[in-house]
């Protein structure tokens, strides 16, 4: 054997030595095991893909318009949604939103807001994986003006005096601000004046004259800019989904240290950061099984929806959101049905669909929600209850009073013994009771209790020492 042939054979042996194990490992896996790994991988990445799709759909624009704004710009909602709003399910009628996507790839960004006074506000910030990075607001930061330095993965530099550094594990961050408004035109204008002072500037431009320039719009982002994220994700198919996921995991959104075990499992079928997913390396039977993975994985995520909370007195109470660790299923369920979610210390949203007998709530009946003396929702911020009719989502109920919530801002009328009775029904309970009335539709409905900054000491919804009372049907 001549030297040239020997060298060629040696090189071939080295190539096979370093590549064959992974290929063999993928081929040796049985259909069920490979499908199980792929399903776990799909669920693991669902929050990342959902957030990225949402980011592109909301920020790949050249100007602020409705709920879209270029990177680094706030879109401020100026008024509560109208009665016929059909945008985002379960709309809010307590706080005005201010949302901004921030790119930390080139350099850190500086976010600032003015003195908020006694007004409740909340600025949770989320990574691409969807956990809350930090939750700045009335509970954590107090009333005064504040300046935050948002830094991306691996940044090392000087934090200027007067700034608080927020370290993001991903290149992109979303700030989802909420500022309390009492629903009057005068108060809307006050909140709008605050919103106008929510600012984001690059660190290099901080304290200097700065003119914002929107980044160029990508004419072909790779998916629909208008379809719902769930639809976009399903349309990606298995390979498209994992290709986006492994690309994001390369530099944009590196996996957390605690993800090492699932990363090792995913590598068995070729799902690894920075590498396109090669389905051809798998057994043909496995490849066939993975074709329907997006649909089957989403059904599994949907099945996990009910497990998010506990049922108490007919109320579904969900806590422990915003921090997920390695509970990838919980994170995926929230991404699919409640993106992105607050920390429980900032807000808890119990909702009720049935009365004390277990019967579905309907406007054909009349109901009361009785709070004994001293047992209204215990909060440091504020509470309210919103009425929703059910029609392919949860939507405000049009009514003559244009009233979608009931809360202490309605000057509630207490009973002589100090207790409080709220009324859920289609027709007015009488002029003397309308302050306590939450107008219901004629059909089925859901009532959602929003508790902002719930108290942590008993009685508290956080430890179960306080729970909402049952909704009682009036005979």
Image (cartoon, helix red, strand yellow):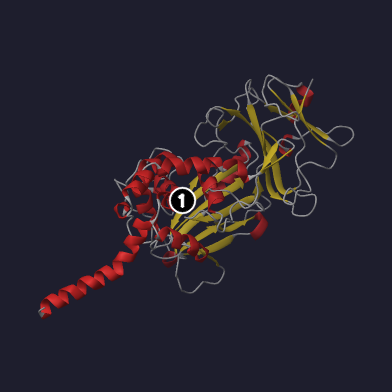
- Give x and y (percent) for residue 445: 63, 28
Relative to 176, 470 lies left or right: right
Q: Is residue 208 above or below residue 281?
A: below
Residue nearest the observer in this picture, 362 or 68: 362
**Who's the residue at 66% across and 31% down the image?**
353
**Who's the residue at 79% across and 20% down the image?**
475
- Give x and y (percent) for residue 372: 84, 37
Image quadrant holding the N terminus, namely bottom left
- Give x and y (percent) for residue 377: 75, 43
Residue 3 falls in which quadrant of the image? Answer: bottom left
Q: Is residue 211 visible?
A: no
Residue nearest the observer in this picture, 35 or 24: 24
**Who's the residue at 47% across and 52% down the image?**
40
Query: Which residue, as the protein is rendered here, is positioned at the far front?
Result: 1
Q: Is residue 101 visible?
A: yes
Relative to 390, 284 lies left or right: left
Query: Which residue, as the protein is rendered here, is positioned at the far right?
Result: 417
- Secondary element under disc 1, as helix, strand or loop, is helix
């Amino acid at each position: 054997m001549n030297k040239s042939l020997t060298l060629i054979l040696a090189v071939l042996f080295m190539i096979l030595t370093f590549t064959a194990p992974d290929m063999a490992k993928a081929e040796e896996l049985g259909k069920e095991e490979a499908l199980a790994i792929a399903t776990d991988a799909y669920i693991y990445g669902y929050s990342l893909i959902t957030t990225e799709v949402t980011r592109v759909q909301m920020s790949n624009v050249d100007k602020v318009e409705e709920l879209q704004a270029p990177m680094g710009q706030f879109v401020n909602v100026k008024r509560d949604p109208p009665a016929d709003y059909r945008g985002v399910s379960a709309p809010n009628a307590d706080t005005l939103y201010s949302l901004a996507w921030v790119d930390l790839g080139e350099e850190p960004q500086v976010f600032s807001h003015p003195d908020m006074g006694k007004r409740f506000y909340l600025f949770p910030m989320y990574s691409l994986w969807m956990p809350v990075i930090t939750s700045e607001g009335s509970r954590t930061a107090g009333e005064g003006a504040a300046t935050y330095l948002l830094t991306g993965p691996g940044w090392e530099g000087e934090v200027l005096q007067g700034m608080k550094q927020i370290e993001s594990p991903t290149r992109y961050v979303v700030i989802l601000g909420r500022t309390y408004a009492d629903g009057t035109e005068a108060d809307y204008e006050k909140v709008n004046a605050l919103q106008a002072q929510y600012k984001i500037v690059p660190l290099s431009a901080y304290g200097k004259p700065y003119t914002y320039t929107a980044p160029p719009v990508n004419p072909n982002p790779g998916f629909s800019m208008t379809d719902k994220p769930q639809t976009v994700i399903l349309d990606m198919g298995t390979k498209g989904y994992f290709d986006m996921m492994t690309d994001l995991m390369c530099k944009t959104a590196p996996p957390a240290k605690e993800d090492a075990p699932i990363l090792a499992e995913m590598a068995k079928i070729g799902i690894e950061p920075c590498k396109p997913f090669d389905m051809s390396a798998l057994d043909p039977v496995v490849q066939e099984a993975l074709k329907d993975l997006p649909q089957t994985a989403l059904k599994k995520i949907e099945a996990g929806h009910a497990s998010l909370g506990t049922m108490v007195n007919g109320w579904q109470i969900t806590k422990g959101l915003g921090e997920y660790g390695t509970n990838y299923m919980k994170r995926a369920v929230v991404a699919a049905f409640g993106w992105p979610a607050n920390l429980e210390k900032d807000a808890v949203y119990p909702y009720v669909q049935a009365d004390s007998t277990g019967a579905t709530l309907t406007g054909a009946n009349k109901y009361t929600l009785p709070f004994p003396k001293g047992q209204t929702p215990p909060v440091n911020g504020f509470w309210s209850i919103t009425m929703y009719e059910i029609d392919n989502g949860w939507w405000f109920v049009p009514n003559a009073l244009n009233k979608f919530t009931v809360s202490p801002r309605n000057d509630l009328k207490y009973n002589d013994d100090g207790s409080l009775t709220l009324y859920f029904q289609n027709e007015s309970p009488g002029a003397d009771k309308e302050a306590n009335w939450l107008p219901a539709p004629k059909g089925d409905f859901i009532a959602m209790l929003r508790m902002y900054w719930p108290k942590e000491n008993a009685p508290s919804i956080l430890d179960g020492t306080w729970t909402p009372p049952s909704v009682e049907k009036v005979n």
